[in-house]
Amino acid sequence: MKIALRIAIRHLGFRHQGSFTSFAGIAAVIGLGLGVCALILTVSVLNGFEDTISRKIAGLDGHIRIQHFLFNPVEPYQTKLDSILASQTTSYSSLAYIQEAAMVRKGRRAEGILIEGYGDNKLPDGIAKMIRKGSSKLEKGRVVIGQELARMLKVDVGDKLVLVDMKSMMTMTSGQRLKQVTIGGVYKSGLQEYDQSVVYLSLEDAQELFQYGNNISGYSISLKNGKQAGIISEKIEEALGYPYYAITWKEKHRTLFNWLNLQKWPILIIFGMIALVGIVNIVSALFMIVLEKIRTIGTLKSMGMDKKTIRRIFLIKGVFIGSIGSLFGLGLALVLAAIQINFKPLSISEEIYFMSYVPVLLDSSIIGFIVLCGLILSILAALWPTHRAAAIEPAIALRYE
């Protein structure tokens, strides 16, 4: 094993600058490295997009929402809900909410909106982090609106608005239910659907505007581990029974997440082909090394070296090229990812992609899997050239010398 290792390192070619073997070895390392780098960055960007969108939507809607099957008002059931959640998860927060359609007016300008009223006079933590101006506190008589809606109405923090219950506009038996409020804060989520149409109000003001009395629409639940949302929502539905039902943030936005999953596989396959090109380069490089070292192989065999040792020499070369290439690709990917995470040189349209820059989320398990696959495929790629090298007969190898 020692003699095979020494010969493999000595004749790998990197020392012999300008030789054909050296060029072939370096080209194989660079090819595999670029393939591994491309695949790591692709997976990291896809994960970044999904994670960013998931966090934004979960911050706005919560991981689980519980409401009446027909969207009717219901009496509060916080105590019962807490007992169910306590048996399923150790870390959660829940807020009672009201959700109803309304219209907002400022002078002659009017827009259709969706009002969400939250209890405890505060916004959920996910929305509070999106505040750009003013305060996240839902004090009585104050609202928090989206930046896009503020632009459409040409208003800012401190301006007054009039909210109109949409249901009262559709009935002839009673007058319109109105409420004058002051803008207490402006948020920006990057999701235009929310920024231009969702307005947040205190639960008491929402109950008064929509004549809910002490009733609510349901509860918004935020979990520390969002991956548990599906299981917990099923347990909640089972415990509460009809007419209540629970929906997760992924089920509510199923079309968006289906689109993200649909995009993943074609992109991964395309960039995976780039990595396979690097593997093919290793096969080519080892064949070139075999051709260039054919005299050396003949000499070693004539001196009594067996086929097993010859195979081992070229297998070590393949492992060496695969290891260096995979580590080079890993290092390059980490450097480029760190640049994007810290300095964000790659920007995108927030109106289209829900974020202003290309997100990158590094997953150590996936990165390790890609690097390991690169190494394993490098070993497999080295088997054929290794077999061909061991099959060379000394007489044939030295015939043309």
Image (cartoon, rainbow, N blue to C red):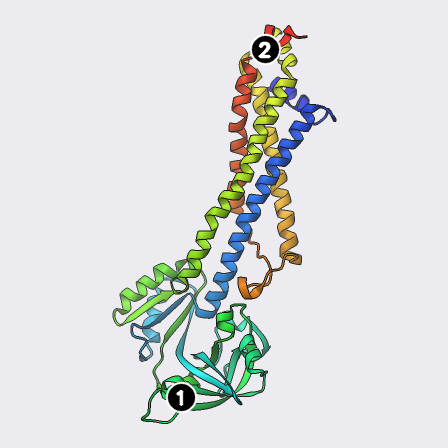
Q: Quadrant of the C terminus?
A: top right
Q: Quadrant of residue 239?
A: bottom left
Q: Extreme right residue here?
A: 17
Badge 2, how many Cα within 10 Å: few under 14, some, many 20+?
few
- Seen from the viewer's position, the closer of residues 134 and 122 is 134
Q: Is residue 125 visible?
A: no
Where disc 1 sits, the SS reads helix
Q: Is residue 199 visible?
A: yes
Point out residue 37 in the picture as x, y percentages from the top left corner: 59, 43
- Seen from the viewer's position, the closer of residues 285 and 62 is 285
Q: Quadrant of residue 64?
A: bottom left
Tell me which amino acid carries mark 2. Answer: Met
- Seen from the viewer's position, the closer of residues 371 and 114 is 114
Q: Extreme left residue here?
A: 242
Where disc 2 sits, the SS reads loop
Q: Nearer the viewer, mark 2 or mark 1?
A: 1
- Relative to 331, residue 224 above or below: below
Q: Please report contact status of discs 2 and 1: CB closer than 8 Å, yes or no.
A: no
- Relative to 79, residue 372 above or below: above
Q: Earlier in the sequence, mark 2 or mark 1?
A: 1
Tell me which amino acid carries mark 1. Answer: Glu
Point out residue 13 in the picture as x, y percentages from the top left corner: 68, 24
Q: CA distance from mark 2 to mark 1?
A: 93 Å
Q: Dot 1 corresponds to which residue?
A: 208
Mark drawn on residue 261: none
- Relative to 147, residue 266 above or below: above
Q: Quadrant of residue 359?
A: bottom right
Q: Dot 2 corresponds to which residue?
A: 305
Q: How many marks?
A: 2
Tell me which residue sits at (48%, 68%) in the image.
59
